[in-house]
């Protein structure tokens, strides 16, 4: 059967795996991984993309990437081409460093982010490269713990799922990673949708992909949208983010969530974190009011 075309969803998140040609090693030293970090950082800026999670293994790469309006292929081609040139200059060789076709699954972040976060970060332990996650340097694990600073990595979304403050979120993340992994995580790549093997997500998530209308990304940030709505309703943002159940505050929360989601400014989890609530409660709020 011919391969299905890539799914291009502006603002979408993808679990990407890029392997060395013939499963051969793509790194020869720590300096090689440092150079890849530099290349990735520049590519993210150029294509207005975000990297939420990563792990550079010996012969393959894992990444959870969120693209902008440019297709994922352009970003991956740029990274693979530039790193291949670097390695070929170093080794004085030619040929393919990577497999020609990288693997990518469009991810339902609201349902699968935490599973993928643990799966990607635990790869070195699963491969028996280390016995403890803290021993492996080349992943985003240390950045989530706060023991390493990577300005080009986006941890706000992930940490926002663990707590409302950075300190509490990092401690919750530490406990989450210390828990034994579930059997389902060992087959995460097989947990694709029954109707589309290019997707890791729920039925509701897949249904949204079938909507033919393309909605351009809003020029406003989530914070700007919230301030606009609060100004219109003549209430404070602090009150909207409080625990009060007053009808005017609830209406503001609904309006903020609807605009942020419809204009592709933020995901359900990001909106919930911004409002100081659980994603499930915001989802239920929208369901009731819609």
Image (cartoon, rainbow, N blue to C red):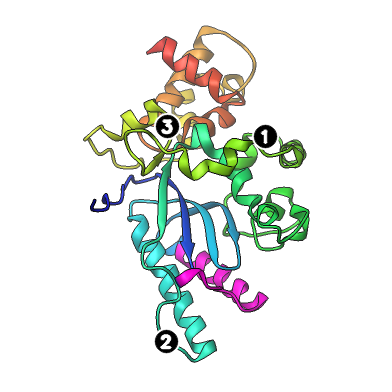
Which mark's residue is nearer the viewer, 2 or 1? 2
Question: Residue sitting at 49 percent across and 24 percent down?
Answer: 230
Question: Residue sitting at 58 percent across and 43 percent down?
Answer: 186
- Give the class, few, some or many, for how many residues have Cα within 10 Å of label 3's Cα (few <14, many ≥20): many
Which mark's residue is nearer the viewer, 2 or 3? 2
Question: Residue sitting at 55 percent across and 27 percent down?
Answer: 272
- Give the class, few, some or many, for how many residues have Cα within 10 Å of label 1's Cα (few <14, many ≥20): many
Residue under label 2:
94
Most common secondary structure along the magenta stretch: helix
The image position of residue 239, as x and y in percent, is 60, 19
Does 6 sit above or below residue 39? above
Q: How many marks?
A: 3
Residue under label 1:
162
Q: Secondary structure at mark 3?
A: helix
Q: Earlier in the sequence, mark 2 or mark 1?
A: 2
- Give the class, few, some or many, for how many residues have Cα within 10 Å of label 2's Cα (few <14, many ≥20): few
Question: Residue sitting at 51 percent across and 66 percent down?
Answer: 40
Q: Secondary structure at mark 1?
A: loop
Residue under label 3:
260
The image position of residue 249, as x and y in percent, is 53, 14
The image position of residue 71, as x and y in percent, is 33, 55
Label 3, label 1: how far apart the Cα atoms are: 21 Å
């Amino acid at each position: 059967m011919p391969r299905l075309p890539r799914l291009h969803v502006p603002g979408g998140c993808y679990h990407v795996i890029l392997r060395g040609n013939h499963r051969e090693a793509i790194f020869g030293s720590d300096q090689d991984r440092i150079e890849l970090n530099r290349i990735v950082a520049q590519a993210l800026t150029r294509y207005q993309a975000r990297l939420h999670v990563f792990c550079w293994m010996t012969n393959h790469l894992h990444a959870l990437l969120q693209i902008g309006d440019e297709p994922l292929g352009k970003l991956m081609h740029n990274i693979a081409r530039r790193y291949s040139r670097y390695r070929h200059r170093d080794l004085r060789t030619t040929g393919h460093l990577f497999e020609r076709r990288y693997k990518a699954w469009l991810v339902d972040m609201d349902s699968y982010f935490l599973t993928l976060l643990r799966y990607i970060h635990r790869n070195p332990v699963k491969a028996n490269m280390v016995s403890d996650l803290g021993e492996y340097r080349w992943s985003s694990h240390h950045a989530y713990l706060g023991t390493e600073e990577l300005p080009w990595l986006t941890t706000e979304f992930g940490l926002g799922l663990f707590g409302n403050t950075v300190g509490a979120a990092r401690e919750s993340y530490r406990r989450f990673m210390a828990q034994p992994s579930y059997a389902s995580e060992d087959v995460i790549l097989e947990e694709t949708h029954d109707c589309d093997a290019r997707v890791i997500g729920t039925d509701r998530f897949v249904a949204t992909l079938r909507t033919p209308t393309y909605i351009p990304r809003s020029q406003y940030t989530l914070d700007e949208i919230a301030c606009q709505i609060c100004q219109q309703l003549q209430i404070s943002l602090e009150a909207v983010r409080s625990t009060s159940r007053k009808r005017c505050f609830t209406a503001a929360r609904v309006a903020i969530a609807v605009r942020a989601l419809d204009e592709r400014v933020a995901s359900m989890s990001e909106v919930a974190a911004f409002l100081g609530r659980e994603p499930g409660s915001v989802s239920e709020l929208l369901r009731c009011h819609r």
